Image (cartoon, grey):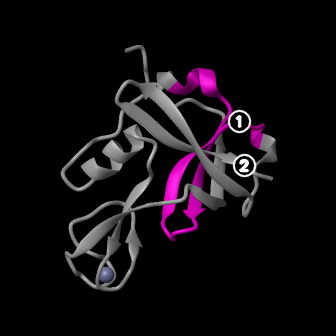
Amino acid sequence: MDYTKPLPSVNADNEHFWKGCSRHELRFQKCRQCGFVRWPASFICPECHSTDAKLITASGKGKIYSFVVYHVAYHPGFKDDLPYVVALVELDEGPRFLSNIVGCDSNAVACDIPVEIAWDDIADEWSLPKFRTLA
Ligand SMILES: [Zn+2]
């Protein structure tokens, strides 16, 4: 494997999420008591403290809530990507999800632009959920 960037840290709470990503499914926990769709994954609902949740597969659509453009690589694995966009994407299902905006000039990125999922298959069992603009 010649992927040189850090990999996500998998634990019991988020294992379902990363397994879903490997199948190109964006899975989130949805509280069976109050309906809150949560991210990051957690044992209890931050809204009502219920532990009763089900998994949903998100549409992969949303809009850019906020973003920054990195012009400095703080990890050597990112230096060939400069400049790159890190954005907080507000998904249609509710969660705000930190990711990258890919496939466009960083100068074209703005808040409220609609986006859709763009899977980055970095290794056999790893796909990272990134986003591309629809505008
Ligand atoms: Zn809840």
Q: Earlier in the sequence, mark 1 or mark 2?
A: 1
Answer with the quarter of the image where residue 69 lies.
top right
Residue pictured at 75% horizontal, 40% vertical:
106
| Ligand 1 quadrant in view | bottom left
Tell me the distance, in whole angstroms, between the alpha carbons under discs 1 and 2: 8 Å
Residue 86 is inside the magenta segment: yes
Q: Mark 1 touching mark 2, by CB under 8 A? A: yes
Q: Count the marks: how many? A: 2
Q: Which residues are magenta?
A: 78-106
Residue pictured at 44% horizontal, 52% vertical:
26
Answer with the quarter of the image where residue 91 lies.
bottom right
The disc placed on residue 133 is 2
Question: Where residue 14 appears, x then y in whole percent?
Answer: 28, 52
Q: Is the CB of mark 2 within 8 Å of ligand 1?
A: no
Residue pictured at 23% horizontal, 81% vertical:
49
Residue pictured at 65% horizontal, 28% vertical:
82
| Residue 75 versus residue 107 in the image, above or below | above
**Type of the residue with mark 2:** Thr
In the rendered view, does 109 fall on the left or right side of 40? Answer: right
Circle 1: element type: loop
**Type of the residue with mark 1:** Gly
In the rendered view, does 85 fall on the left or right side of 28? Answer: right
Binning the other alpha carbons within 10 Å of mark 1 as few (below 14), some (14 to 19) or many (20 upward) gives few
Residue 58 is inside the magenta segment: no
| Residue 49 versus residue 41 in the image, above or below | below
Q: Quadrant of the N terminus?
A: top left
Circle 2: element type: strand
Question: Where residue 124 appears, x then y in whole percent?
Answer: 37, 24
Mark 1 highlights which residue?
A: 103
Answer with the quarter of the image where residue 71 lies.
top right
Binning the other alpha carbons within 10 Å of mark 2 as few (below 14), some (14 to 19) or many (20 upward) gives many
